[in-house]
Amino acid sequence: MGILHYIFTFVHLMNTVYLLTGSNLDNRHEQLSEAMFGIGKRCGEVVDFSSIYETAAWGKTDQRDFLNQAMMIYSPLDPSALLKELLAIEKYMGRERDEKYGPRVIDIDILFFNHQIIREPGLSIPHPRLQDRRFALEPLNEIAPALIHPAFHKPICQLLAECPDPLPVKKI
């Protein structure tokens, strides 16, 4: 068997996952970098990532602006195991869940996991409000504009064009 067979087998054993990281506390750039490092170490290979984008806080506006970054990873983990690892990274980095939409040192969301639709207690994939959040769609559109949302059957570029969120998102 040739090297192409091994590469094909490896890629098919891996899950293609899109994540969004966000931070609005402390050194926001450093938090995103540390999160990406942790994801690469604990969850799988970071294959691609977007620029960093800045936007006003969504849902609770009396706080510092967020920095967000989308990334694509190849992960051997199943969705539940991946969520567990991402929550562990958030906890290690000091994430506290005191207030809904409140400030956070790091937030890591699973946007897509392969083309699966998962609705379980504590785990919703694709992210249930992705289509309504420009701060997630802008960075995702940079790395995967043609990616089709499995529930809406529309590419990310179209969801971004139709997004009702008025908050400006600025590429840093």
Image: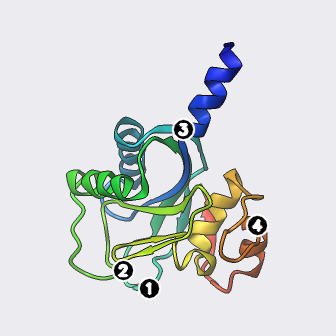
- What whole-number distance in Å separates the C-alpha atoms at marks 1 and 3? 38 Å
- What whole-number distance in Å separates the C-alpha atoms at marks 4 and 1? 25 Å
Task: Residue type at mark 1: give it.
Answer: Gly
**Residue at the image position 63 percent from the left and 83 percent from the top:** 165
Which disc, if any, is residue 13?
3
Image x and y of residue 91, in percent: 22, 57
The residue indicated by pointer 2 is 101
Earlier sequence position, callout 2 versus callout 1: 1
Image x and y of residue 7, in percent: 63, 25
Q: Residues within 10 Å of mark 1 (few under 14, many from 20)?
A: few
The residue indicated by pointer 1 is 59
Residues at marks 2 and 1 touching, judged by CB atoms closer than 8 Å: yes
User: Closer to the camera: disc 2 or disc 3?
Assistant: 3
Task: Please say if 79 is above or below 155.
Answer: above
User: Closer to the camera: disc 4 or disc 1?
Assistant: 4
Q: Residues within 10 Å of mark 3 (few under 14, many from 20)?
A: few
Q: Residues within 10 Å of mark 2 (few under 14, many from 20)?
A: few
* Image-quadrant location for residue 162: bottom right
**Residue at the image position 26 percent from the left and 81 percent from the top:** 99
Which disc, if any, is residue 12?
none
**Is disc 3 placed on a helix, strand or loop?**
helix
The residue indicated by pointer 4 is 155
- What whole-number distance in Å separates the C-alpha atoms at marks 3 and 4? 25 Å
**Is disc 2 placed on a helix, strand or loop?**
loop
Q: Residue furthest front?
A: 1
Task: Residue type at mark 2: give it.
Answer: Tyr
Q: Residues within 10 Å of mark 4 (few under 14, many from 20)?
A: some
Image x and y of residue 101, in percent: 36, 80
Earlier sequence position, callout 4 versus callout 2: 2
